[in-house]
Image (cartoon, rainbow, N blue to C red):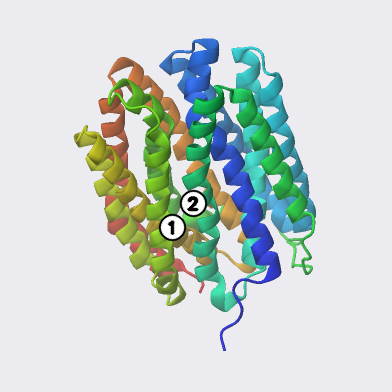
Amino acid sequence: MQERLWNVNYLKVWVANFMIFFSFMLLTPLLPLYLKDTFDANKDTIGLVLSGYALTALIIRPFSGFFVDSFPRKKVLLISYFLFFSFFAGYLVAGSLLLFAIIRTLHGAPMGATTVANSTVAIDVLHPTRRAEGIGYYGLSNNIATAIAPAIAIYLLQKTQSYELLFWIALLTAGCGFAINSTLKLNPKELVKDKPKLSLDRFFLLKGWSECVIMICHSFAYGIVSTYVAIYEKEELGVTGGTGVFFALLSIGLIVSRLIGGPSLRKGRVAKNAGAGLVVALSGYVIFAAVHTLWAYYAAALIIGLGSGHMYPAFQTMFINLAPHTQRGTANSTLFISWDTGLGLGVLAGGIAAEHLGYHSAFWLAAAIYLLGTIGFFAYVQGHFIKNKLR
């Protein structure tokens, strides 16, 4: 008999992860519009302000992995989640662009810590025989949140013209996630005690450096497209309200590919899933950059989702399989470090490219970086993983 996948603790962290990404994605796609409408910010400024949270998330990730591996995980999770929840209140009181930028930047730290801690706990509560599959299904929680949150946000904004309402909903949703995680019942786990305090491998999974580079290319492209898609749609395609459809199609692709890819991951086809996902997502980014019609806009969203849904859980499994059990938190934080690095660089570079060369150049930049990552995977990373994996 197969061990149970959907146990009570796994369900709780799954729902709590949904709350993290729902509250975050409720705001993220509309923040460029908010900054433009409220503070009359230009594209360069928007890119600078919105890349700040990725920087602080990046800084905190290595320490998050260290704390998750070195201290009781539930305690680390609850402290991180409470701070993540609390920062949403800051958006309600930010009356200037500078104050908003400070709050948004600082919010990246608990966001980074919470996602590392929550995903590590999710891996802990899964049986080893269902772990790779469970990692894939865990990602469905953020995919579903990404699918519905922007659509809900756009609908509410059109009906009420109130960004404040969205900030309140995000605050309450994050609070619900914190309450759910407070009911977790976890068994004590082995903690890192004997390694040197300043050992680099307690903060970064050195064996995963090449996988980290590919993930940076992936999130760089996603950062450009996801951040500037709402303004691009409005200013160049002449459509309003289609951003919700874009993210819904993106998430449908993610969900479908995760469901299809789960059994394949359980059978150990990790590198195969990763490579297939990269190729499919690359075609989506090329379509998005090359064809400027509404149908191509929506088709690219679905294709990027299908590719990313195969690629991301495979890469997370790769990081976990390269690390000993005592470095599970470090493996997760390394994955998120690479994600945040690419995301922040993508948002910043995309803003500069869009301001000075136009949106088309920004999206071609995304496709070019993704192509480099795909080539690097097949040329080196795939073989590196097969040679160095521990399980």
Choose top left, top right, bottom left or bottom right for residue 292. Answer: top left
Where does the image place residue 98, in percent across and percent down from the top left? 62, 14
Judging depth in this view, the residue of 154 and 214 nearest the camera is 154
| Mark 1 in CB contact with mark 2 (< 8 angstroms) | yes
Work out whether residue 2 or residue 73 is closer to the camera in this orientation and state it: 2
Q: Which mark is residue 187?
A: none
Give the numbered dot on residue 143.
2
Q: Distance of mark 1 from mark 2, alpha carbons? A: 6 Å
In this orientation, which residue lies closer to the viewer: 36 or 286?
36
Please report the residue visible at 69 percent of the width from the left and 36 percent of the height from the top: 171
Can residue 256 be seen in the rendering of this structure? yes
Q: Secondary structure at mark 1?
A: helix
Write the residue at 37% across / 50% down.
305
Judge left or right: residue 328 versus residue 150. right
User: Most extreme residue toward the bottom, as rendered?
Assistant: 1
Q: Tell me which numbered mark, 1 or 2, is placed earlier along the sequence.
A: 2
Q: Amino acid at mark 1?
A: Ile
